[in-house]
Structures are given as C-alpha cells and as structure tokens.
Image: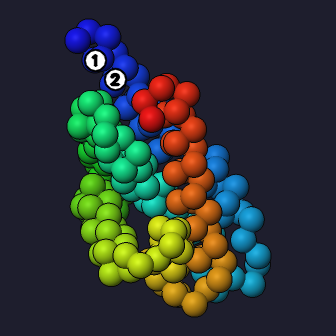
C-alpha cells in the first residue's frame, strides 16, 4: 500500500503543478489575433479555469477503470481547494469584493458539464468545449475563443493521456 500512496501522491502533485502552470496559457492567449473581440486578460483568466477543470475531468475519464482514480482525483481536488483558498485570500487583500475561487471553479465545471451533457451526440468533447469557452469569455461567436477553448482542452487531454500512459496507468 505504501507504493500506491507514493504513486497517487506523486501523480496528484504533478497534475496539480501542471494545472496551475501558466506558460502554455500565456502562449495560447498571446497567439490570438488582435482583431479578437475578447481581451487577452479574459482569455488568460478563463483558460486557467478551463485547464484546472479539464485536468480534473480527464483524471476521472482516463482513469475510470484504475484502482488509483478515486485517490488521485481526491488528492488533485484537495490541492486545488487549497490553492483556491490562497487565491481567495489574496483577492480579499486587494479587493473590496471577496471572490471565492473554488466556487468560481465549481460553477465553471457545472457549466461545462451541462454543455457536454446537452451535446452528447458530439463526436469530440472539444467541439462542445470550444464554443462553451467562447460563451464563458462573453462572445459565443468569437472564433478565436472557440479555437482557444478547443486547443486547451485537447492539449490537456492528450498530455494527460500521454503522461498516464508513461506511468503505466492507462
């Protein structure tokens, strides 16, 4: 059991650190053409949320038959909760309006899950996630936002699949 605990802790730590890493988010947001109707700050903010959520969803999907799924998922979301608490506290220090970041993540997760459930006939989840991302950004018709959301989700899903495969978990 000691070995399992190490695998689960290692994987959840790696996935958490990947979820809050900003380089890929900044690169994606910076790749948007200047004629986009949505500002780079909105893209960056929503991409971070989508990345965190996508990792959590992909853990459950990719590890659906794994004995490690429940523990990895629980440890990942516990790390996200702790991170969210620090973000919430930081916003209270700099703003008169407190923002519960974990609540923001939960509402966004519920939003994306509802969109996926309403479009179960879609051939790929990214074909639903892209437009949903654009809607979250404020303009469902913005093709840049649709592409960014799709790219982020696909990047997370393929990266996670590769990583978990290298760890012999899928």
Do the CB atoms of the residues marked 2 and 1 lie less than 8 Å apart?
yes
Instruction: Give the image location of residue 75, x and y in percent.
Output: 27, 34
Residue 44 shows which numbered tag?
none
In which quadrant of the rendered image does the C terminus lie? top left
Q: Residue at x 60, y 53 (%)?
A: 155
Is residue 13 or residue 23 the one in the foreground? 13
Between residues 144 and 99, which one lies in front from this camera angle? Answer: 144
Q: Quadrant of residue 141?
A: bottom right
- Residue 161 at what x, y percent from top left? 52, 42
Q: Secondary structure at mark 2?
A: helix
The residue pinned by badge 1 equals 5
* Viewport quadrant of the N terminus: top left
119 w.r.t. 40: above or below:
below
Q: Residues within 10 Å of mark 2 (few under 14, many from 20)?
A: some
- Residue nearest the observer in this picture, 35 or 9: 9
Q: Which mark is residue 9?
A: 2
User: Residue 4 location in percent, x, y?
Assistant: 30, 17
Q: In which quadrant of the rendered view does residue 95 lie?
A: bottom left
Relative image position of residue 5 (x, y in whole percent):
28, 17
């Amino acid at each position: 059991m000691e070995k399992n605990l190490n695998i689960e802790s290692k994987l959840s730590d790696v996935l958490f650190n990947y979820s809050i890493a900003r380089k890929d988010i900044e690169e994606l947001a910076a790749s948007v053409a200047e004629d986009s109707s949505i500002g780079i700050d909105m893209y960056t903010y929503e991409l971070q949320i989508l990345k965190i959520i996508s990792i959590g969803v992909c853990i459950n999907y990719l590890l659906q038959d794994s004995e490690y799924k429940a523990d990895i998922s629980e440890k990942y979301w516990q790390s996200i909760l702790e991170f969210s608490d620090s973000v919430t506290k930081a916003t209270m220090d700099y703003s008169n309006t407190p923002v519960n970041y974990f609540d923001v993540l939960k509402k966004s997760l519920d939003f994306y899950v509802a969109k996926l459930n309403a479009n179960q006939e879609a051939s790929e989840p990214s074909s639903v996630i892209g437009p949903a991302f654009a809607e979250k950004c404020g303009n469902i018709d913005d093709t840049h936002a649709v592409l960014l959301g799709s790219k982020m989700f696909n990047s997370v899903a393929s990266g996670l699949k590769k990583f978990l495969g290298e760890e012999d978990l899928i």
